[in-house]
Image (cartoon, rainbow, N blue to C red):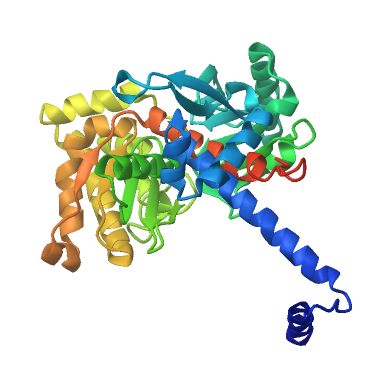
Amino acid sequence: MSNGHMATVIAAQHFGHEPEKAGWSFMLTRSSTELVRQQNRALVLEALRQQSGQSHTDLALETGLASATVTAITRDLENERVIERSEAPPAGGRGRPRVLFKQRRTAAYAAFVRISSDAFQYSMVDYSGTLIDRVEEKRENTGQKVEAFANDIRAALVRLVERTRISREDLKAISISSKGLVADDNTTLLWSPVLGSQQINLRTTLAPDWKANVTLSHESRLVASALHTALARQEGKPIPRLAALSLGHSIGLGVVHTGADGATWARAPVFGHMIHTHGGALCRCGSHGCIEAYAGFYAILRTAFEVPPTTIPASFVPFREVEKIAILARRGDRMAEFAFRQAGTALGNGLARLISLHGKMPVVFTGPGIRFFDLMRPGIDQGLSASLGIRIEGPPDISLSLDEERLVYEGHLNHTMAAIDRDVIAAKINGQGGSP
């Protein structure tokens, strides 16, 4: 609508006349009203996601919405069978029982797929975020074609819904995670340790069989988001920045920032494939000198046994083989010790560049490789100290998180259930909207 026509509409309304095409005003008003209702519903759902089992008063305080608005929203959500109420003893033991609202577990379901170097892991959760079933299937870690890879996922998802007896229509989201390079569309895997340069759009792949919304995330992005959320809750305040660095067969990094408005955004820069040394050791990605070519499990194996750095990397290194090298290093074996220290130096140099670009932030190391962190730490400190900024301001706070699998799951859970709340449940107003 032009500014002139908008002025006409406003003037006509002011003087009590009906302007030509005044239906535009009605449509704008209706659209704005529905948007506000949708946003208010999302606020209530978000509050319940933060803590299930809240009273009407709790929700009003948490969301800042008027009591009447909260009453209307909770009534609608109850009628839609999205939430349910229960009673709790009154505070102080006197008076009427408190009515508490929580998610109805059967309102929606989501499936999580974790793709790792040697396995697929499939999880089914209900709308309350409760894990219903989990299946892990070993996979071929060498030479699998993208068509067979896609068929494995399709078949496993069918088995998962059959095991849990959930209807396909009730599955609202499929969230997939992998290491590698994920396109900005959050559905296409551009490069991965599993498929190499074979690309796959997972939304297109699964669309013929599933109406659920399909998303793809870098695994380290989910880990960083889960850590950031947990730390912010623990400290009761926003965390400006946080990095999660995964050590293992691959090297993955997730970074989370909190803006001035309190909104957070997470990224998974291709840290493992940043150049550490120009023209250096051969990486699984085909480039030379990547951080991963010095810090991944295959790189540690290659260095410890003095294999030429241009040797084609092993596609998969069993964890027990790296443990054997660590035992040698702790006994004083020179090359084994050097392999871990070199890995640490590559990681430290990469972190120094990250901090130079994004500012100082806490760094949490995760993944199976943290079992050898003591052997890498001298190299990490050496790599960090090469940066002028770090020498002046001091190194970042470094900590370890042992259960990466749990963090990946929590990242899936936080990301996916919030999306269902926002895009499916909150958007369903008067029977409209709410497509997965």
Residue 160 sits above or below residue 279 on the image: above
> Which quarter of the figure is the C terminus placed in?
top right
Q: Position of residue 85 (x, y in %)?
A: 54, 24
Query: In this rendering, is residue 67 above or below 122?
Result: below
Q: In terms of depth relative to the viewer, which is nearer, 237 or 29?
A: 29
Q: Residue at x 63, y 30 (%)?
A: 78
Residue 184 horizontal/vertical position (percent) = 58, 55
Q: Nearer the viewer, residue 272 or 261?
A: 261
Q: In the figure, is residue 138 to the left or right of 307?
A: right
Position of 191 compared to 56: left or right? Answer: right
Quadrant where the N terminus is found in the figure: bottom right
Q: Is residue 297 left or right of residue 396?
A: right
Choose between 4 and 291: the one closer to the eye.
Answer: 4
What's the residue at 46%, 53% (across, down)? 287
Q: How many marks?
A: 0
Residue 233: tell me if it is visible: yes
Q: For residue 419, which quarter of the picture?
A: top right
Residue drawn at x 15%, y 59% is 385
Q: Which percent across, then down, holds residue 306?
A: 28, 38
- Residue that lies at the very extreme toward the right in this rendered image: 20
The one nearer the camera, 33 or 391, is 33
Q: Residue at x 57, y 28 (%)?
A: 127
Residue 308 visible to an observer of this rendering: no
Answer with the quarter of the image where residue 320 lies: top left
